[in-house]
Image (tube, helix red, strand yellow):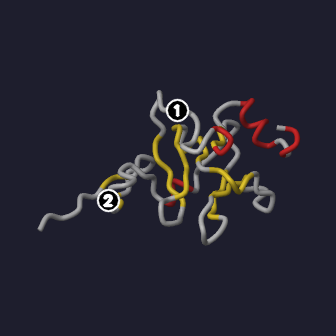
Amino acid sequence: MTETPEHHCPGCGAIQKHNARYPWYFCGACLKLAKDFEGNALVFFNVGAMGGMGWAYSEQPEQAMSTTVSQVLCYINNRKVVVSEARFGGIVAQPYHEGEPEKGSIGEKYFVKLTNKTAVERARAKPGER
């Protein structure tokens, strides 16, 4: 029997359990370091038992910006990452690789990009102002 390989968190190097679906995921401690382009801290959460991911700014968690996102493009330790809902619940962050499409698998409407000033302003706008 072969052992499942371990992997190292791309943010801090901590050893993590291998996950074939998410081979380069960030550890939970690094996920808590997620920030937008301006350096504002972010939080992510599952919105219900049937799935869905939401996000908010840490200083305003009660004002969730969206509860219908598939992915959020942001930064961990100044590195672009894609945060998404894990297959069976939970939240997972993985490195973003340049050249990947900057929209989620279910369309740009559900992909929140927080990597430049214009995108951050758009994300912070009220739904009718976007």
Q: Which of these two is toward me, 16 or 110?
A: 110
Extreme bottom residue here? 49
Residue at 55% across, 49% down: 83
Alpha carbon distance from label 2 to label 1: 26 Å
**Left or right placement of residue 62 versus residue 95 in this view:** right
Front position in the image: 101 or 93: 101
**Under tag 1, what secondary structure?**
loop
Name the element at disc 2: loop
Give how far across and how far down residue 24 sits, in percent. 38, 49
Which of the 4 quarters of the picture holds residue 102? top right
* Residue carrying label 1: 101
Q: In which quadrant will I find the N terminus?
A: bottom left
**Farthest residue, direction left:** 1
Amino acid type at circle 1 is: Pro
Q: Quadrant of the C terminus?
A: top right
Residue 115 against residue 62 in the figure, above or below: above
Residue 96 percent across, percent down from the top left? 48, 38
Give the left or right position of residue 92, taking residue 4 as reference: right
Residue at the spot of label 2: 18
Judge the density around disc 1: few (<14), some (14-19), many (≥20) Cα neighbours within 10 Å: few
For this orientation, the residue located farthest to the right is: 128
Q: Is residue 11 left or right of residue 123?
A: left
State the image quarter where residue 105 is shown: top right
User: Of the residues shown, which amino acid type is indicated by label 2?
Assistant: His
Q: What residue is rendered at 47% in x and 27% in y?
A: 99
